[in-house]
């Protein structure tokens, strides 16, 4: 079951009490493998990750893994109630960051659906940002 889908992503980031929101609408692939859902799309200049493919692996409501391949490879693991050290690539090099998962809600089915997750990022154990991501998946009409 691999489908071409429309993907709506809203990200909210809070840094030092200041909130910023970004919305992205794109197309991509949606499939199920090994009992887990995968959402994959090509980043654009608008996101600042042009030349990068992002893939989200959704393991129910326990864990979401974001893999970025291409220009700035990264792996972020958002796991509810747990802190993971993850590799994050930037234009000026790679760094290790802490990712603490607060909430994961998956309403994904074979037809599409919704995913939301909340996590915080830290650098050297100092809070860098709090983040929420809201994703909607709809099958492309042919």
Image: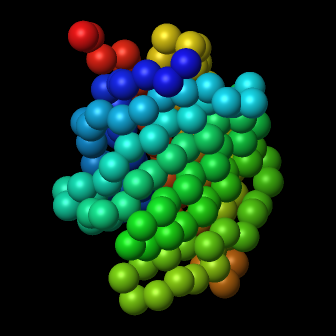
* Residue 41: % across, % down: 38, 43
- Residue in the image at 42% along x and 78% along y: 90
Decide: is 6 above or below 134. above
* Residue 62: % across, % down: 76, 37
Q: Nearer the viewer, residue 53 or 112?
A: 53
- Residue in the image at 36% along x and 82% along y: 91
Q: Furthest-left residue in view? A: 46
Find residue 16 and report its image quarter.
bottom left
Decide: is 92 above or below 32. below
Relative horizontal placement of residue 106, taking residue 133 as reference (left or right): right
Q: Nearer the viewer, residue 130 or 76?
A: 76
* Residue 8: % across, % down: 33, 32
Quadrant of the image containing the C terminus: top left
- Residue in the image at 47% along x and 87% along y: 93
- Residue in the image at 43% along x and 73% along y: 72
Q: How is the image coloured?
A: rainbow
Whether residue 114 is visible, yes or no, is no
Q: Nearer the viewer, residue 131 or 9?
A: 9
Whether residue 68 is visible, yes or no, is yes
Relative horizontal placement of residue 41, taking residue 22 as reference (left or right): right
Relative horizontal placement of residue 90, taking residue 96 as reference (left or right): left
* Residue 134: % across, % down: 44, 35
Find residue 1 and report its image quarter.
top right
């Amino acid at each position: 079951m691999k489908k071409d889908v429309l993907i709506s992503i809203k990200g909210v980031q809070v840094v030092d009490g200041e909130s910023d929101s970004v919305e992205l609408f794109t197309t991509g692939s949606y499939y199920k493998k090994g009992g887990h859902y995968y959402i994959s799309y090509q980043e654009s200049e608008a996101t600042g990750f042009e030349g990068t493919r992002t893939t989200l692996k959704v393991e129910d409501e326990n864990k979401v893994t974001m893999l970025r391949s291409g220009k700035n490879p990264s792996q972020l693991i958002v796991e509810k109630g747990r802190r993971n050290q993850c590799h994050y690539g930037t234009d000026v090099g790679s760094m290790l960051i802490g990712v603490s998962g607060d909430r994961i809600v998956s309403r994904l089915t074979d037809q599409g659906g919704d995913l939301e997750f909340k996590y915080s990022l830290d650098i050297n154990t100092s809070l860098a940002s709090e983040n929420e991501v809201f994703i909607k998946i709809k099958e492309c009409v042919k």
